[in-house]
Image: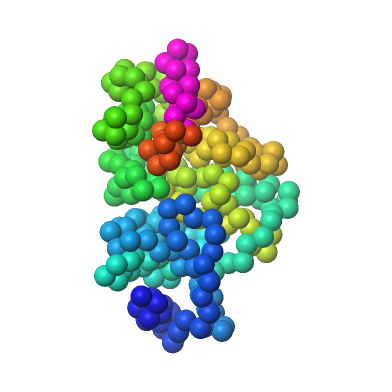
Amino acid sequence: MWPTIANQISEATKTDFSVMNKKPLAGGEINRAFYIDDGQTAYFVKLNDAVHLEKFRCEWNSLDHLRASDTLQVPRPICCGSTLSSSFLVLAYLPFNEGSEQAWHALGQQLARLHQSQHQPMYGWDDDNFLGLSIQPNAWHKKWSTFFAEQRIGWQLTILADKGIHFGDVEEIVTCIKQRLIHHQPAASLLHGDLWRGNVAFYDNRPVIFDPASYFGDREADIAMTELFGQFPHVFYQGYNAVWPLDAGYRERSEIYNLYHLLNHVSHFGEPYREQASSSVNRILSS
């Protein structure tokens, strides 16, 4: 496997590369991660079974879109491929460290500029991609309320129902969310799509985002997730609002947006998130 990865790196960079040093890295719940180098140049390698190659291709596509926005730093994708047993994604290696308050403030400003930088007339993405291991459907829609209610919440509820996990009548919940969002027709911004604290780091005190699940949607969906699993520092939100203040009604919509991620976590990890997701569904239905 490693000779194959080295060969693909050599082809992608037009520079001979062979693996001299290799060590596993902690932090991944879905993929295995490694640091490799040839004594001079270092790379970050994500590994999974061969059947997950399409997931890595989708991640590459999201990273490419984020890099093209020229607003936020992301690890540069080098190559992506598979062997008989494994799939892999190779990224430029960045030695991460803690960020200062100034760096978190800059992240907020840069995220706002990302959201301002690229818009589409419709909501979605050219292809379906992945949120974790779950397929994320992205068929283009003109109405945000329809897109989010059906392709985010309805999709997750259907996946869970197929696993025998129920949070109520799917059609009732989807209809409720459509009604809650029906008058909200925001700009379709380029989103990171999975922006929790574990997907943010700092290199040379500059923010870096990674592991995206991008699509064009309401910018508030990115902001809401920054509050779900370990809220970002206050200066991050100050930085964001200094560039593009959040709209009225964000607080009410944020729970709807975060329900998508809670349901996905129930699908991936089960009971630890089931009660939290159920409580969220009940609040949305009763409000």
**Where does the image place residue 179, in percent across and percent down from the top left?**
37, 18
Residue 130 shown left or right of residue 229 in the figure: left
Q: In which quarter of the image is residue 18?
A: bottom left
**Where does the image place residue 140, in percent across and percent down from the top left?**
29, 40
Please tell me which residue is depicted at 56% across the width and 25% down the height of the picture.
Answer: 251
Please tell me which residue is depicted at 33% across the width and 25% down the height of the picture.
Answer: 166
Q: Which of 229 and 193 is in front in this view?
A: 229
Which scheme is used to colour this image of the protein?
Answer: rainbow
Please tell me which residue is depicted at 45% across the width and 61% down the height of the picture.
Answer: 32
Asked if the stretch drawn in magenta spans residue 79, the answer is: no
**Outermost residue toward the front?**
271
Asked if the stretch drawn in magenta spans residue 275, the answer is: yes
Q: Count up the numbered dots.
A: 0
Please tell me which residue is depicted at 48% across the width and 17% down the height of the picture.
Answer: 283
Q: Is residue 180 at all visible to an observer of this figure?
A: yes
**Where does the image place residue 138, in percent across and percent down from the top left?**
31, 42
Q: Nearer the viewer, residue 247 or 237?
A: 237
Majority secondary structure in the magenta region? helix
In the image, which residues are magenta? 273-287
Q: Is residue 119 at all visible to an observer of this figure?
A: no
As displayed, is residue 187 above or below residue 100? above
